[in-house]
Amino acid sequence: MTWRDAALPAGVFAALALAPFLGFGQSHSLTLLARAMIFAMAAISLMLLVGGAGLVSLGHAAMMGVGAYAVVVLDHARITEAWAVLPAGVGATALFALATGAIAIRTSGVHFIMITLAFGQMAFFTASSLALFGGDDGYTLYGRTEIFGARLLEDRLAFHFACLFCLVAAWALVRALLASRFGRVLRAARENETRVRALGLEPYPYRLAAYVIAGAIGGLAGVLLANATEFVAPAYLAWQRSGDLLFMVILGGLAGPHGALLGALAFVLVEEWLATLTEHWRLIFGPLLILCVLFLRGGIAGLLGRG
Amino acid sequence: MAEPLLELRGLNKSFGGLRVTENVSLTLEAGEIHALIGPNGAGKTTLIQQISGALAPDSGEIRFLGEDVTRLSMARRARRGLARSFQITSVIPSFSALENAALAVQARSGSSFRFFRPAAREAALNEAAMAALEEVGLAPRAHLPAAALSHGERRQLELAIALAMRPRALLLDEPLAGTGPEEAERLIRILRGLGARYGILLVEHDMRAVFALAQRVSVLAQGRVIATGSPAGIRADPVVRAAYLGEEEGEG
């Protein structure tokens, strides 16, 4: 079981690394793959909350949004250096997660879903009202983030590998966290909170730490997303997108971070593929998702793991 | 004279108009098994919950190791060495028996804010967890998920988890509940072995177990302690017979 947990994602990462050289090197394909990898990263961070800590957040798009808007704020001030943009994006999101998580994690179950949704919508409306950064219309970046003044990320292939690197790092981090002492407390508290308390462990600080870490990874995904599209709009924070992320996690399966990886890639690529077939693709996509939930109990990862 | 391990002083608790704990005072000495018996609804589990910190008493004081712990959370009391088992088995179902015990070891040894090292490969945790499982005779089943264990084995695991915490005092809420005669026999043997090393407050319906294990027995009826004494003394006490034992014998 353990080798498969690592072999499956390793195969996916290898495929992503080779894709540009196997006929997916055109700019359209690379844009799509970058988008898929960025959402996979966000989904993996959400998996730490949903699958690890049992915290079903419906406000995770706000994490990506805060990261993306950090890029916007710095871009507006003409700061595009990666060594400023990355810490700012990740740090701002971690702070946002700390502030909202400190309140949200005091609740549980449906209340937690509702309060994360509320914080997400708050962030959405805040972004919509930022006239300086385009308000509802969004904001077009002057350019992508630079590394030591070099415009490396303008190159689509370089950006592809930057996204892949971050994705692998996010996967490895979440995987390690879940297996650590920290992750063991999270998983135990998800299943039996009273037992964990009776052992002398208070779940709250562990859950809050998980929320902040997941937020920070989501923020990094947001920084990358802003770079991928060179445009940021309040729609990035909309609750529909939080729903998409949650769906990717459940579609992929909750057994490990590789589930979220597979779920997100499948979600983004199938969505794109259906859209090329017909303009009524949503009519196919919706029922397809329902069928997956009904018949793939362990998610895509469970399906592949059984074979 | 040294203070007792655990001491309740004038504990009161009401749910609405119902007084479930009324002026309860009792002590638990180190190395003693003190049994708490009483008919259904006498308030035994409510009392255990107040001692462990799951419920707050309305008034009164709980002293543990010479300190007032009445206002401490359940987690803080556990860290001071007050372990409890649950009347209804409370384990982590998807964790193996070993990992259940290892979590208890982890909770008392070092920080759990360790993010990178795989906990399942920490030898110190696994060894201490395995020792606790051996003590209750569950070592051969260590790698099965708790959900796959039989009811009796889960009661053993519950006990192993409490032991893995290296507690000073154990609160055992009906450790024999729902076990068959053979499993009960085995658990009684295990408990007798533990009695000398910990103070054990034992809530139990199985009178055979109570009289086989306890050095002292307290009888709870309608929230009040109506008698405390040696097992022989309690058995002979006419008040107790009227309130409890007679009724029980009548049923049997």
Image (cartoon, rainbow, N blue to C red):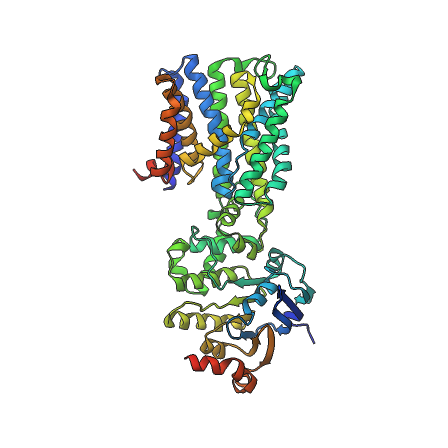
Is A43 or A279 nearer to us in this picture? Answer: A279
- Split into 4 quadrants, where in the image is the C terminus of chain A? top left
For residue A97, which quarter of the picture? top right
Where is residue A132? Give x, y as percent: 66, 17
Where is residue B54? Give x, y as percent: 59, 59
Vertical position of residue B158 compared to residue A137: above or below: below
For residue B218, which quarter of the picture? bottom right
Q: Is residue A79 visible?
A: no
Vertical position of residue B136 compared to residue A2: above or below: below
Vertical position of residue A265 compared to residue B69: above or below: above
Is B84 left or right of A269, judged from the image as shown? right
Is B17 or A177 nearer to us in this picture? Answer: B17
Q: Residue at x 38, y 20 (%)?
A: A280
Where is residue A134? Give x, y as percent: 62, 16
Q: Residue at x 63, y 33 (%)?
A: A96
Count numbered badges in the picture.
0
Vertical position of residue B249 compared to residue B77: above or below: below
